[in-house]
Amino acid sequence: MSCAAGPSSGGYRGGQLAYPEAENMTRPTVEEVDFAAFKRALERATADRMRIVPGEQERWQRYVSEHGVREVNFQGFVRSKYEGLEPVILDGGEMAGYYMWSAAEERALCWRPATKAGDG
């Protein structure tokens, strides 16, 4: 299962909805994933040239745009709780997604975008 696919835990956020279609949307979430599984997926992605690092600006921006990643929000949230995590994208495979990770901390967190209620 891809980190970027599947149901996420939505819920009532309070206040009024700005857009009627938002009633059927869940919230984006951050999911901690098994570090050993992430490392294996990272190694496979690197070997298959499916790993994208921030320095690859064109590929990076294309992925972020196509998948609706809120980079500033995700990175801000993660960095408020953990130190030393770096962004990486796995663009394919079983664990495809946008991650913040650290080998020293043995931690990997994945951005799970909002989905339509009932999808996934």
Image (spheres, rainbow, N blue to C red):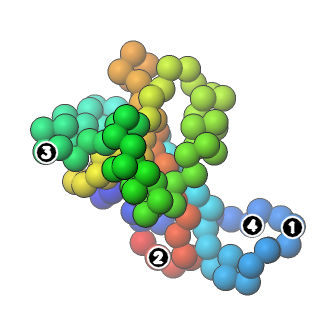
Front position among marks 3 and 1 = 3
Real-space CA distance between mark 3 and mark 1, rounded to the nearest whole angstrom:
45 Å
Question: Quarter-wise, where is residue 117 in the image?
Answer: bottom right
Choose the circle earlier in sequence order: 2 or 4: 4
Choose the circle earlier in sequence order: 1 or 2: 1
The residue shown at (30%, 58%) is 1
Report x, y in % for residue 37: 27, 38
Residue 48: assigned label: 3
Identify the amino acid type marked 2.
Asp
Judged from the image, the secondary structure of the residue bearing numbered disc 2 is loop
* Front residue of 107 and 87: 87
Identify the amino acid type marked 4.
Tyr
The reply to whether callout 3 and callout 4 are in contact (CB within 8 Å) is no
Report x, y in % for residue 53: 35, 37
Is 47 rendered above or below residue 1?
above
Residue 119: assigned label: 2
Front position among marks 2 and 3 = 3
Real-space CA distance between mark 2 and mark 3, rounded to the nearest whole angstrom:
29 Å
Quadrant of the snapshot with the C terminus? bottom left
The residue shown at (63%, 38%) is 77
Most distant residue in the right direction: 15
Kindly identify which residue carries mark 1.
Answer: 15
Front position among marks 3 and 4 = 3
Residue 12: assigned label: 4
The residue shown at (79%, 74%) is 18
Choose the circle earlier in sequence order: 3 or 4: 4
